[in-house]
Amino acid sequence: MVKHIIPNSLKEALDYMDGHYTTIVAGGTDLMVQRRNWAELPPTFTSDPVYVFHLSELNYVNEDDKNVYIGAVTPMSVLLDHPATPQLLKDAIAIIAAPGLRNMATIAGNIGNASPAGDSLPILYALDALVRIQSKSQNSLLPIAQVIQGPRKTILDNNELITEIVIPKDPFTFQMFRKVGGRKADAISKVSFTGSVRIEGKHVTDLRIAFGAVAPTVVRVRDIEMEYEGKTVKQLQQQVKSLQEAYATYIRPIDDQRSNKEYRMNVAMNLLEQFISSLKEE
Amino acid sequence: MNDITFELNHEQVTITADPSLRLLDVLRDRLHLTGAKEGCGEGECGACSVLINDQLANSCLVPLANVHKQRVTTIEGIATTKEGKLLQQAYSKEGAVQCGICTPGMMMASYALLKKHPHPTREQIQIGLSGNLCRCTGYNMIFRAIERAAKEGEGTW
């Protein structure tokens, strides 16, 4: 029998997590489906559930000159309406699920679940988001790409909780997010594309590209980006074929009930081309 | 087993239960409020929609623990209110109810939408109902019902 913990504070949650096997439950939108049983039966938990969604100290959006700070249990609907939320993240949230679900879903949940199809993840990768991880005695801030290790696998130890997401305010001049799914609402991505650039004059000075749902984790390759940074918009557009070839080795989609390898690869490449051809000199 | 206390349709209730139980099951089986329906059980159809602290929520995804000390409103709670009656009349006049399975969830989504946008555009209505499936009406009658409820309920929302 598991013990159910409804803590009164973050401290209480971390204290209990220190020395017990636990499962963190935030909004429940993914977990309650994963652990689902027949109607009327409780879901299956093999370690003690710790319910954190009601903790108001983890529900906030703050900003300063450098960063936006998002508390771990801030619902996506709050982020969608908040002026400090980066536009790219709003674009992704606007087509995640539907209003009722967005009132419960959190981006910390997206990170904790580490689903290859989590729609906020490519945005967090592209924006160099940092994840604050706390335990009773530790507090660390790690890049998102280090936190997520594989499908449904994170670096988090059993006593650790995601408490905050920090998104740097970098100056971009053009951004694009596209999600391809079976329908407009409530769809799980077949493939998604995130592009974000800073163009100064004729030159691309900052290039960020991330693909979702086409590999075990989000595909963002800093080496490729660096190779093309510093080029002019025109050069980049002339070299789009070699850019596509560079990414093709990192994109390893699977066949599943939602889509297949070939479709995912083709769409990912087309979205990349669309993004590059949309770039304009400032 | 834990004691979970919450406000349900303006009354305090305390349930002794497994806190991971779905709110939907507790509402239907323990509290005998059968307005919320189970359609898909995974947050894609909206038939189980309720309000938690006035926000639309899929009760099939909510562990009971998450409503501890919170405020829950179901279709039974809004049925007798002025807004609830407006919605019922508007749905009826526009023929927005056919088999009826989606209707309680649709009305909860309509209610949440009109509280947020008292004069919704067609696009806001479509987004507001995007988490609710109906296999009978083709949605147009439901969209018109919401437009009617907004117009006839001017000043109420």
Image (tube, coloured by chain):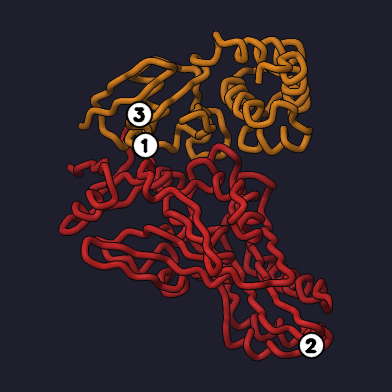
* SS for callout 2: loop
Tell which of A82 and B76 is nearer to you. Answer: A82
Residue A138: x percent and y percent?
A: 26, 67
Residue linked to disc 2 = A232
Chain ID, orange in image: B
Please determine whether, in this image, residue A82 is positioned above or below residue A155. Answer: above
As measured in the structure, the alpha-carbon distance from the residue carrying label 2 to the one carrying label 3 is 61 Å
Viewer-nearest of discs 3 and 1: 1
Q: Quadrant of residue B124?
A: top right
Residue shown at 66%/35% (left/top)? B128
Residue shown at 52%/18% (left/top)? B75
Please determine whether, in this image, residue B81 is positioned above or below residue A36. Answer: above
Residue B1: x percent and y percent?
A: 20, 32
Residue linked to disc 3 = A40
- Pointers 2 and 3 in contact (C-beta within 8 Å): no
Residue type at mark 2: give it.
Thr
Residue type at mark 1: give it.
Asn
* Residue A133 located left or right of residue B40: left
- Pointers 3 and 1 in contact (C-beta within 8 Å): no
Q: Are the residues under marks 3 and 1 on the same chain? A: no
User: Subunit of mark 1?
Assistant: B
Viewer-nearest of discs 2 and 3: 2
* Residue B149 located left or right of residue A60: right
Q: Is residue A176 visible?
A: yes
Q: Earlier in the sequence, mark 2 or mark 3?
A: 3
Chain ID, red in image: A
Residue type at mark 3: give it.
Glu
Q: Quadrant of residue A120?
A: bottom right
Residue linked to disc 1 = B66
Tell which of A91 and A132 is nearer to you. Answer: A132
Residue A188: x percent and y percent?
A: 58, 52
Viewer-nearest of discs 2 and 1: 2
